[in-house]
Amino acid sequence: MASLEALADELERSHAELQERLADPTVYSDRREAADLGRRLKELEPALRVAREWRQASTDLADAKSDPELSSFAGELEGQVARLEDELRLALVERDPADAKDVIVEVRQGVGGDEAALWAAELARMLQRYAERRGYRTELLSASENDGGGVKETVFAVKGDGAYSVFKWEGGTHRVQRVPATESQGRIHTSTATVAVMPEVEEVEITIEDKDLKIDVYRSTGPGGQSVNTTDSAVRITHLPSGIVVSMQDEKSQLQNKQKALRVLRARLYEAERERQQAELAEARRSQVGTGERAEKIRTYNFPENRLTDHRVKHTVHRLDQVLDGDLEEFTEVLQAEERRRALEAAV
């Protein structure tokens, strides 16, 4: 990593250049460029603020060392400069550009039949409660229930500043170990549900051509396959170049179902492009969802022992009831700290 002084200079230059470009009237004729410049400017500001604080503290320290009347402040200022150096290095680590975005969350039953569907429903409730605890807004996009009261799949949006930076840690296979209500012998069963978390993107970020879409309409169905309305309001959109298929049927209006389906399609295409770019840079991460098999897991929720373990950071708590009520802050903080540690390690 270059010297902090050089990096602070580069921050000042980059910030000034971005402000100058944003002030150019021609930029506003290109919505995508204007949005990109605004995002980059916002991302630079925290690091620039720390850089300016570090420079001021460094100047104060130099003054204290050269002036006998101020020398008593030198020890305190040295600690402040060291703390700000650490903060600046951390702020200069490149952030995921998707971190500030809203998200679309898909929860699906995995292995375990009806018990897996019930677990998927509980998992979706947990994540929605967590969103509410953090002051985010949730919007249900679709839900496909089974006959046993669980869900085969549910899709919802989470809206709020930094939603992706919080919810991206929930993507993966969540394994539950408990005695199902239908189990007469009291045996513990293991089942899974999978979660996919995708940044929600604006239309200007992902362009979808009409010629690339195959749109089918049909009648909505409920659990067991029975028809729940008499009009062809359900929509299935197939993106021909990628093969991605999105279906929506929760709204009574065909137009509303189509709009929701396009939102989910944009998010899936954006995530697919992100993964392709990461693979090209040899930084491909494991697929969030995997196959849903019991062995592929990010967390285990053990009801008999009131225990939850996150296998990525080997972090365990014994307060499962609180976690299922949406108290996930501790896990988010541990995972974010590990991400920062690794990013800083790689940068240095």
Image (tube, helix red, strand yellow):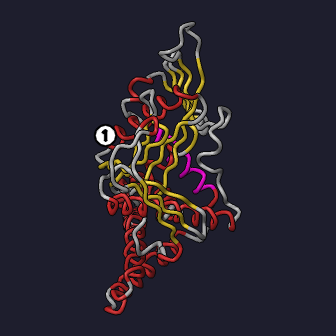
In the displayed structure, does residue 314 sit left or right of residue 155?
Answer: right
The answer to whether residue 303 is seen in the rendering is yes
Residue identified by numbered label 1: 133
Q: Which residues are magenta?
A: 331-345
Is the residue 92 above or below the residue 289 in the image?
A: below
In the displayed structure, does residue 292 sit left or right of residue 45?
Answer: right
In the displayed structure, does residue 295 sit left or right of residue 61?
Answer: right
Where residue 51 sits, quadrant-wise, is: bottom left
Is the residue 263 above or below the residue 292 in the image?
A: below
Where residue 319 sits, quadrant-wise, is: top left
Q: Secondary structure at mark 1?
A: helix
At horizontal 54% and vertical 13% (from top left) the residue drawn is 183
The answer to whether residue 65 is seen in the rendering is no
At horizontal 51% and vertical 41% (from top left) the residue drawn is 108
- Tell me which amino acid carries mark 1: Arg
Is residue 348 in the magenta section?
Answer: no
Is the residue 324 above or below the residue 260 in the image?
A: above
